[in-house]
Image: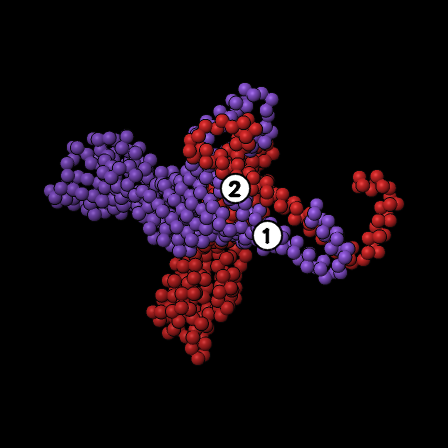
Amino acid sequence: MEHVRQKGVFDHLLMLERTEAAGPKGHQKARLEELQTTAAKIRAKRDRIRAETSTIKNLKEKMDQGLPLDDATEDLVQFEKYLLTSQRTQLKDLQTAHRLIAGFNLVESKKGKSVCVAFHTAFEGVCLETYNMEVNLTRMVHISRHNIPSYIPLEKLAKQSLQTDFKGFLQTLNLHLNALAGRKQQISLIKELLGTVEVIEKNQLCNFLAFVCKVPSESEEAVLCTLEYGDLTRCLPTQVVIDAENKTLIESPQWKENHVLLKETPVHSALLTMRKLGSIL
Amino acid sequence: MQQSFILQLVTRLTPGKTMDILEQQYEEEIKLLQQETVACEIERDECLRAIFRQHGGETLQNILKTISIRKENEDGVTNGDASKLVTEISDLEVDHRRQTDISGIFLSECWIKTVEKSSTKTVQQYRLSGRCWLLSFQVEFVLTEIQDGETTLKKVTDLNIISDGGEFKDLCGFLSSVEESRSLFLFFRTLRSYSERCKQRTCTFQHFKEKYPDLVQLPEGCRSEIMVIQSPQLPGCMMSIFWNICVSKEGTVMTKLDLLMKMPEQAEKLDTENVMASAPESFRHLLSVFGEEATIESLIQSVCF
């Protein structure tokens, strides 16, 4: 803009006209120049970080050997910055690790008047949805906003312990959210890993699931399994019902074992085991 | 400067094709430079982490103190960077304390190493040591983050748990199932509720040991599952309470208390109402009505004279 003002608007328009006249060739030239600047910028950044690294290495070596830091004051100012950065890096790592293992993290907001809680759900090592909640801490502790699904009994849980045991409340809610995420994930894993199994009914809370699997035989008999999850803090069913037209089949020892399997292991792994053992297609 | 001159010369003299090649060359150079920058960043951060690991705590604070004294002597040297970092550090420390308090998990060692990093994928190795109440643990795992458009896929692999302390012997089945299914988060959730139950048991045992030092014995220490009630006036009579805390494979923590009675043979003959045989059943009934503490209290009262 400076440039434009110096030369005047007409000159600038003239320049634009010329660029236009130059056509695609002019565009390409501009593009090349742009690339060149970008490259120069990144090169400068790389060189800066390289220089930093070598100063830090120098500092580390001195510290490792227990040498006194008697450098010029400017160097010491640099060292101080890196030592503080090293401390910050450690604390940031701790923060990341804590957030990861605690399952939820708190951030104070509105000058300590409220606190924001983020719940990170996961199932079998895979991180799933994150839910957020803002809790107002002034006078009566209450939830001011949240994006927790309506089918989670949040109000009931809040009534039980929000006022009296905040930590306990967060842990119970975390349990509910993780169990929901786990049940949901199991259903999507069935669809992903077991194309032959057909989910015919499920609900939002994922505490009811009905699916049909086929038995490897000429007639490809269908077996209907119904799973009910009575405990909303768990991702294993409390009741399993297996039904088929062929009653002798479902009374067989093999299917008795399958019943136990479905009750004691996550449904997708139970089905995978059943397929491996030749119970289902 | 020279490069820019060549660029001008080339673009003026050659047709579009050479320009295409040049463009490609620049793009490749940028890509390479970006990779180098990331590698440099990783090296720098690793070096910073190594400094803290080896000299963290006191040594580091002492050096910082020396530097600030020297800065004061040669007044006029102010460092905006440093004061900004100091504020950031104290904020992070506050956050760390809050996290520790709310999660009940104290981390004593946190070792993170970046193995791979690009604009779409980050792979980091973790080693965390710490304790939850008195139960110490060490976990190692790999965290992979893949950026796919708007969404980030975060995944834990290679989970390895090293646990310490007698309490963990009841957790064997759970631990191996957690390792197999890489359920890092489930491990910490369960560890928390398990340690809470252990704490409750230990506190209750300790409470009775202090209240009735002559009647209560903890033969395997206050952190084990056994408490023995024995009155010096009733030699041969012994009540043992087994307070078991079990963890299922899916991480549900359950408490089970059992009572075992021992009486001299002569006394057993006088037991016409089968008090001995029905004791465990009655004990369970009392537990369900009054809870652990009141039930144990009433047992102790029964041998108090």
Res. A172 visible in picture: no
Residue drawn at point x = 66 percent, y = 54 percent: B26
For disc 1, the neighbor class at 10 Å (few under 14, some 14 to 19, many from 20) is some
Q: Looking at the image, can residue A199 be seen?
A: yes
Alpha carbon of mark 1 to alpha carbon of mark 2: how far?
18 Å
Identify the subunit bearing mark 1.
Answer: B
* Both labels 1 and 2 in a single chain: yes
Who is closer to the viewer here, B147 or B294? B147
* Label 2 Cα neighbours within 10 Å, binned few <14 / some 14-19 / many ≥20: many
Relative height, residue A9 to residue A204 (above, below): above
Colour assigned to chain A in the rendering is red
The colour style of the image is by chain
Q: Quadrant of the N terminus of chain B?
A: top right
The reply to whether the C-beta atoms of the residues labelled 1 and 2 are less than 8 Å apart is no
Residue A246 position, x and y percent, is 41, 75
Side of A12 where A133 appears, left or right: left
Percent x, y of residue A21: 84, 56
Q: Which mark is residue B44?
A: 2
Q: Colour of chain B?
A: purple
Quadrant for the C terminus of chain B, please: top left
Circle 2 SS class = helix
Q: Classify B35 as above or below A143.
A: below
The residue that disc 1 covers is B32
Q: Amino acid at mark 1?
A: Leu
**Which tag, 1 or 2, sits closer to the chain's start?**
1
